[in-house]
Structures are given as C-alpha cells and as structure tokens.
Image (cartoon, helix red, strand yellow):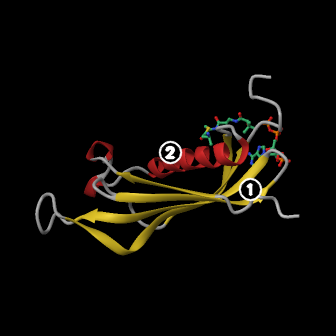
Amino acid sequence: MTDSRLGVSVTHRRYVPYSHAHYAGNLVDGAYALGLFGDVATEVCIRTDGDEGLFAGYSDVRFHAPIRAGDVVQVSAQVSRVGTRSRTLELSCAVVCRGRPDRSESAAEVLDPPIVAVTATGTVVVPAAGVSREE
Ligand SMILES: C[C@H](N)CC(=O)SCCNC(=O)CCNC(=O)[C@H](O)C(C)(C)COP(=O)(O)OP(=O)(O)OC[C@H]1O[C@@H](n2cnc3c(N)ncnc32)[C@H](O)[C@@H]1OP(=O)(O)O
C-alpha cells in the first residue's frame, strides 16, 4: 500500500526585502534559499507527522539563477520518499515577480514563466511515531 505522506507538497510565497540584499546587483546570499527551504520543510513535517522535524542534510543543492531583493519567490517542497523517521523532499525556489528598475524605482512585473533559481534534495527527520522530541 502506498504511504499517504508520499507526494505531500507545500508551497510558500515570500517577498525578498531589500534589507536581505548582500552582494552586487542586490543579490541575496545562497543561504537565503536554504532558510526558505527550512520553513517549507517544517510545514511538510507538521502535515505529515505532527512535528516540525529537523533537517538532517541535503544530497544536492543547485543554484541555477540569482535571487534579488525585490523578487517574489515561490518555494515548494514535495515528499519523494518516506523512511522510518526520515522523509526525502524535492525542493525548489522560483522567482515569480521581479522589479524593473529600468522603468521606474518601484516598477515590477510577473515573470511568466517563473525563473527556477534554486533546487535541492533534502532529508528531514521526525520523531518516531508516538514519541515527542523531549522523550
Ligand atoms: C525542517 C526543520 N524544522 C527546519 C530545520 O532546518 S532544523 C535546523 C537544522 N537541523 C538541525 O539542527 C538538526 C541537527 N541534527 C540532529 O539533530 C540529528 O542529526 C538528526 C535528528 C537530524 C538525526 O539524528 P538521529 O535521530 O540520531 O538520527 P538516526 O537515528 O541516526 O537516523 C534517523 C533517520 O534519519 C536518517 N538520517 C540521519 N542522518 C541523515 C543524514 N545526514 N542524511 C540523510 N538521512 C539521515 C537515517 O538514515 C534514519 O532514516 P530512517 O528512519 O531509517 O528512514
């Protein structure tokens, strides 16, 4: 029988504030996307296992395109494997809106299609069924 947690997916959207710009061209650092992956993975763990879970590691992280201050990003996680306590997630962060400073200081547009900026495969670990983290 297929585990009902397989395929569970969660999506968050977030505006990237200018206070997070770190490099030339208003780029954010690579760890910014990993922080967003932690948040979306946390909601996956809550939905699948009733616990926030802990990130154990990433088997693959790819930075395909920059993320900039002023972007709106869409972050998604989908469960691709269910172990005893581990869950493997396929993660992606795509830019769905971006500023157009060439038009005006506050001009921005919807990107169609979105730009896939970061992808990763990650593993989260949850407590054994019926056991809370403190026990
Ligand atoms: C999603 C979060 N809410 C947001 C975060 O980002 S949390 C912040 C970053 N993470 C942490 O601070 C976690 C620090 N690490 C730990 O506390 C522990 O290492 C752990 C809880 C992640 C694992 O420790 P432990 O419970 O002792 O693990 P094990 O009993 O050895 O294994 C349990 C299952 O987890 C699999 N596993 C363990 N380590 C890894 C790894 N590095 N990569 C992939 N998989 C790992 C292990 O194979 C077991 O799997 P099954 O239960 O057999 O499916």
Nearest the camera: 130 or 21? 130
Under circle 1, the secondary element is loop
* Picture coordinates of residue 117, whole percent (x, y): 45, 64
Q: Image quadrant of residue 73?
A: bottom left
* Picture coordinates of residue 120, whole percent (x, y): 59, 60
- The residue depicted at 44 percent of the width and 48 percent of the height is 32
- The residue depicted at 14 percent of the width and 68 percent of the height is 102
At label 2, counting other C-alpha atoms closer than 10 Å, the crowd grade (few under 14, some 14-19, many 20 or more) is: few
The amino acid pointed to by label 1 is: Arg
At label 1, counting other C-alpha atoms closer than 10 Å, the crowd grade (few under 14, some 14-19, many 20 or more) is: some
Left or right: 108 as drawn, with respect to 95: left
- The residue depicted at 48 percent of the width and 47 percent of the height is 31
Residue that label 2 marks = 35
Under circle 2, the secondary element is helix
* Picture coordinates of residue 23, whole percent (x, y): 31, 51
* Picture coordinates of residue 112, whole percent (x, y): 36, 76
Q: Image quadrant of residue 79?
A: bottom right
Left or right: 117 as drawn, with respect to 50: left
User: Of the residues under marks 1 and 2, which one precedes in the sequence?
Assistant: 1
- Name of the residue lying farthest toward the top: 134
- Name of the residue lying farthest toward the bottom: 113
Real-space Cα separation, disc 1 to disc 2, in angstroms:
23 Å
Q: Are marks 1 and 2 in contact (CB under 8 Å)?
A: no
Residue that label 1 marks = 5
Residue 33, numbered circle: none
Q: Is residue 99 visible?
A: yes
- Name of the residue lying farthest toward the right: 1
Q: Count how many numbered circles sit on residues in the image.
A: 2
Q: Is residue 60 visible?
A: no
Left or right: 133 as drawn, with respect to 19: right
Q: Image quadrant of residue 131?
A: top right
